[in-house]
Amino acid sequence: MIEFLGVSKSFGNHKALEDANITIEDGTTIGIVGPNGAGKTTLIRLLCGILKPTEGQIVIDGKDLEKYPTDIKKIIGYLPEEPNLYERPKAGELLEYFGLLYGVPRGKVHERIDELLALVGLSDRKDWRVSSFSKGMRQRLAISRALIHDPKIIVLDEPTMGLDPLTSRRIRDFIKTLKKDKTIILCSHYMNEAEQLCDKIAIIDKGKIRAYDTVENLKKIYIKEKMFKVGLKNMKSEILDRISCDEKLKILERRENYIIIKAEDYKDLSYILKEEVIYFEDLTPSLEEVFIELVGSKND
Amino acid sequence: MVKWEISRLFKNRKFKIAFTLQLLVILLIIPLFGSYVRSLEEGGFFNLTIGGKGYIPIGVSSEENSLVDIISENDRFDILFLERERGLELLRSGRISALLILEEDFEIKIRSYRSSTVWIYIDEENPKSVSAYSELNTIVSGFKDGVIEARIRDLSIEDPEIELFTELPIGNGQEAIDQDMRQVEEEAPVEEELEVVERPSSIQDQIERTRETFEDERGGYIVLLVLLLPLFLSGGMLIDLLISEKERRTGEMLLALPTERQKIYYSKFISIGTIIFSQLLFWVLALYYFGRVSNPLIIFPLMVTAILLLSITGLIGIYSKNYKDSSLIVTVTFILLFIMLFGTSTLYVAGLKEIAAISPLSLVIAIESGTFSVREALVSILPSLGFSLGLIYLSKTLYKKDEFYFGPRPSISELTYEFAGKLRLSGILYSPYYIAFIFGFIAIFISIILEIFFGIITLYFIESVFVILFLWAAIEEFSKSIGVFSAAKYFPLKWYEGMLSGMASGFGFALLENIIFTVFTLNIFPEYALRIFVMRTFLSGGVHIVSTGIIGIGISERRYLIPAFILGIMIHFLYNITVLRGVL
Ligand SMILES: Nc1ncnc2c1ncn2[C@@H]1O[C@H](COP(=O)(O)OP(=O)(O)OP(=O)(O)O)[C@@H](O)[C@H]1O
Ligand SMILES: [Mg+2]
């Protein structure tokens, strides 16, 4: 279990993270979402022991990170925002270097390297120099470096940033395969990505954590009302009157062929749907739009 | 981790190139260096460029004395024993290149420590003659130093007046030889101003010793030049190791590793250290094998120098944001280091061993010439080693801070503030004084550098001691005021607090200055060290405290800033003049 207890981090006078309080259960996947400069990377670096908090405490498995940094760092695998790889060595050598530094036994390290390179699809590049790698390959190599010591906690800072949709997807699929028995903390600009992969999402903006909950709860909390666009075969005044009298429903727009209705829940619409429906669309905002609203309104 | 760092280094192309270049240079130097040393032994560097191989015929007025013995050991000279008149004739006609006239009773005078004059006549138009002059002059000066040293040993007389005339006679046009010679006669005589003594002396030993070390020390000096090459190079490599991690952001992964942060710094330090050590070991043994180094023990002072260099460059690497940043600091530091290390070892060769002893490189020369004592070794190793350890500790502490990898990099005064900013004793905030005090320490280094720099420039344009004394007073006061300014930046100071901060800064300055001064006197006149320390503490310490105290008032009450500075500097200047008067 990972606990942030009132963690703040300042650079000079600038507060990059303010009073963060979150708890991450073992085996869950957590998404950290926020705009540029929100403090995502700062939060993650604090978690990896790369930065030291100005205030507060980070406790992992009951141990204070500041007191037992080496013990804790051993169980964390970290993918930095930029791959930050040495250029000179060959892919295999690089992994060996980090494997040994992370304490993987010398006898096992090569086996582990082959296994990981196969997982990320770089087996044939083992003896290529890192400098010859493309961006996507570097990212995959960096992921395998993060996993070399089979860490319990995996921290990924924007794993799909700047990659083409196909590669992004491959990486997302790969993360899904990891999900089974690991704690994953994942940083992203994209709510969609977080929604797809994560059990819980923290929305962070200007150094403050605005929300931290499961995807469903977030939806429940922030998407109070749903919107539907419904077109009926005969837009009779009788049914429309009934809708406008219904307290649970509200007509936002009324056109010749369709109406847009706001409702708290889908089932409130049930009697309407018994009519002959020729058109139906769910206009409910996605979590992404909620996020933009949440973050955007405050930015203005 | 060290092992990995080393293997990574060996795979690094930049390193390979640097290493190969260095190897080539050193390999090239060995033969060159052999002939260089040989030519030094045989008779001067100048001959190599001007005279070529031939013998230089010189005339000497008397046969039987120790100076002529030394001269005749030099194979380059072909000595003719001549009367003065005959000699001048031959010199004019170019048959001999130089004429050395000694007093009849030269040997007796020297052995009883009386003054004797040596005249060297040369023909300025003749390049051979010029080179003969330089050679003879060096030998005579060396001889003179030896005599003075022997005298000091015999009598323990303090502080001899040493006057060296080592000007090269440079001709200007077609003047008559006769005239030239008169000119030389006026300028070049080397006089031994010695007092009469009756005691018998150990002069013969001293002469022997001087002659031997004279050659050896210069040999050792060249060894230094060669061996320092890898040292300076490796310093650059350490900076590269530290900064490339910042520039390419690869350091972030190192920080994420399950090791303590300072170990990353240590591993870099140790890996470069190991490389230097093996290189030095290799070169020293190789040179020893070829007979160019007489004692492989020189590896120890060289290692101390290497550690000093690495600890400095390591700190630079940690403090700099990027290469651009570091290259500036590195250039300045290397120049200073070069001046310090070589300056002192030059002093050593020039005979001022006591001052020079503080540089480990002097020990290299001393070991080479077989004239070192354990005390000398400690004096030259301990200060450097202590300083290095201090720097390493500082580097480690800074490296553990996030700011030195991720920025924003704190300034020195911010660091001092962080260190001393919350110091309270029974409810009263002492921080401003503490900050000023620490800056007093730093001010010493700033002012030494500025004083040397501006001192030389001023001397070049105006040869006035008073201007320099004033300049030094101003430089020292300005350096000390930095501490008060930075204390005032964090704490609003009332006038008396400003004064106290100024006094604290002056006190810190005076304290360190006295310690440094005392270390030197301890080495030269141990019996006076305590007295000098006490005297200086009260006199110069008092002046430093008062003058900067006044400036401190000006800094806290800005209206009086300029008058306070003027007053402070004047007090300091007057003190400087008084000291100078006292010495004269
Ligand atoms: N080393 C630093 N020095 C000064 N300010 C910093 C430093 N690192 C981060 N910051 C500031 O802290 C804030 C948070 O930065 P952080 O890198 O955590 O943002 P982020 O959410 O990861 O942004 P992005 O999505 O662009 O990666 C930013 O305002 C940034 O300017
Ligand atoms: Mg980021």
Image (cartoon, helix red, strand yellow):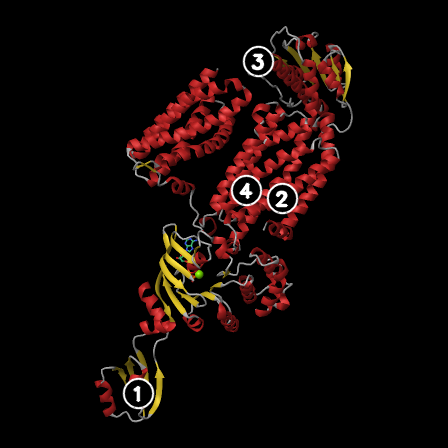
Task: Confirm or deny contact between disc 1 and disc 2 (CB under 8 A).
Answer: no
Q: In which chain is the residue bearing label 1?
A: A
Task: Confirm or deny contact between disc 3 and disc 4 (CB under 8 A).
Answer: no
In the depicted structure, whether residue A21 falls above or below residue B566? below
Kindly identify the amino acid type of the residue bearing the numbered disc 3.
Answer: Ile
Residue at the disc numbered 3? B157
Q: Residue at x 67, y 33 (%)?
A: B297
- The quadrant of the rendering that contains the N terminus of chain A is bottom left
Circle 1: is it few (<14), some (14-19), or many (20+) Cα within 10 Å? Answer: few
Kindly identify the amino acid type of the residue bearing the numbered disc 4.
Answer: Thr
In the picture, measured across the screen, residue B234 lies left or right of residue A237, that is: right
Q: Residue at x 42, y 67 (%)?
A: A31
Q: In which chain is the residue bearing label 4?
A: B
Reading the chain from its start, which is encountered first: label 3 or label 4? Answer: 3
C-alpha distance separating marks 1 and 3: 117 Å
Task: Confirm or deny contact between disc 4 and disc 1 (CB under 8 A).
Answer: no
Kindly identify the amino acid type of the residue bearing the numbered disc 2.
Answer: Thr
Residue at the disc numbered 1? A270
